Image: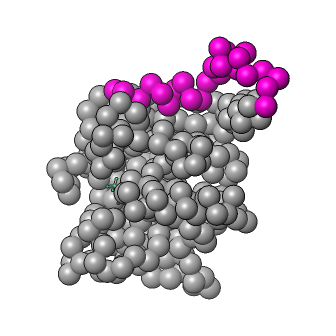
Amino acid sequence: MEIRKCLFPAAGYGTRFLPATKATPKEMLPILNKPLIQYGVEEALEAGISNIAIVTGRGKRAIEDHFDISFELEHQIQGSSKEPLLSDIRDLINRCTFSYTRQKQMRGLGHAVLTGETLIGNEPFAVILADDLCFNEEKGVLAQMIEVFNRYQCSVVAIQEVPKEDTAKYGIIDGDLVYGRDDVYRVHNMIEKPDPEDAPTNLAIIGRYILTPDIFDILRETKEGKGGEIQITDALMEQAKNDRVVAFRFKGDRFDCGSIDGFVEATNFFYKNL
Ligand code: G1P
């Protein structure tokens, strides 16, 4: 089973970044001169995935325009010193296909993933949450996860250790290390955003998933969970009951660009390192 498609849930309002996100999708906020979602698409492409599926919503038109040719602009800067600034995005547009579907109501990440079913169909797929910006010099996080998927042939979640007081911001997993590895856990429990005293570990899910397509049938049956939303964590827990989820402690840096602190950290990091 080859991973050919990557889903980007991008319908959320980005309320933590108001007023910047009042008329601009949060996925279009730039780290230096590149929008967050472009970093995500580049990560997918580096992992060999060129079929990009985006779940959008009202007010997200800028995303579609970004991944399209802008005739007027290109004509205007043709032959000028500015032209190279567009070469990366042009290359990306040439190498990828983009498809879109709209989520009419915000009912949580699980519901957003289920909305993407029409673009994914019956095959395993990757999910990137663009506001979790990941960077690893040698091999990107999604490329690392695909190797894990190829080995274990089940859903994969990316995890990292977080301070215990932060568990209420994340899905938290519990599991046992797989024999012979220090970075892959067979998951036997997952809880969405538990308070620190209820968290079984401090291993937090970050915004990278590989999901097997049975997740769609499970999501259809998943009841509203934490915050009254349909949670992907709850659907994954159903797979975990049958030992069908592994958690992978990836190599690299991750920035929570949904928060001002993480956004500034990412900006400084990329300014210094690239
Ligand atoms: C979502 C998931 C959560 C996960 C997080 C990673 O939460 O529900 O399990 O840990 O993404 O960024 P959100 O950040 O959308 O509230």
- Whether residue 73 is in magenta: the answer is yes
> Which image quadrant is residue 149 in?
bottom right
Quarter of image, ligand 1: bottom left
Q: Nearer the viewer, residue 193 or 239?
A: 193
Rendering coords of residue 101 (x, y %): 43, 28
Residue at 77% over, 35% down: 84
Residue lying furthest right: 79
Say if residue 226 shows up in the picture. Answer: yes
Say if residue 91 shows up in the picture. Answer: no
- Quadrant in which the C terminus is drawn: bottom right
- Relative placement, left or right, of 156 versus 190 is right
Rendering coords of residue 214 (x, y %): 43, 48
Q: Is residue 274 above or below residue 37?
A: below
Residue at 60% over, 69% down: 252
Residue at 53% over, 57% down: 267
- Relative placement, left or right, of 269 versus 10 is right
> Which image quadrant is residue 144 in?
bottom right
- Whether residue 245 is in magenta: the answer is no
Q: Nearer the viewer, residue 67 or 141?
A: 67
- For the magenta stretch, what is the residue range? 57-81
Residue lying furthest left: 228
Q: Nearer the viewer, residue 268 or 24?
A: 268
Q: Is residue 16 above or below residue 164?
A: above
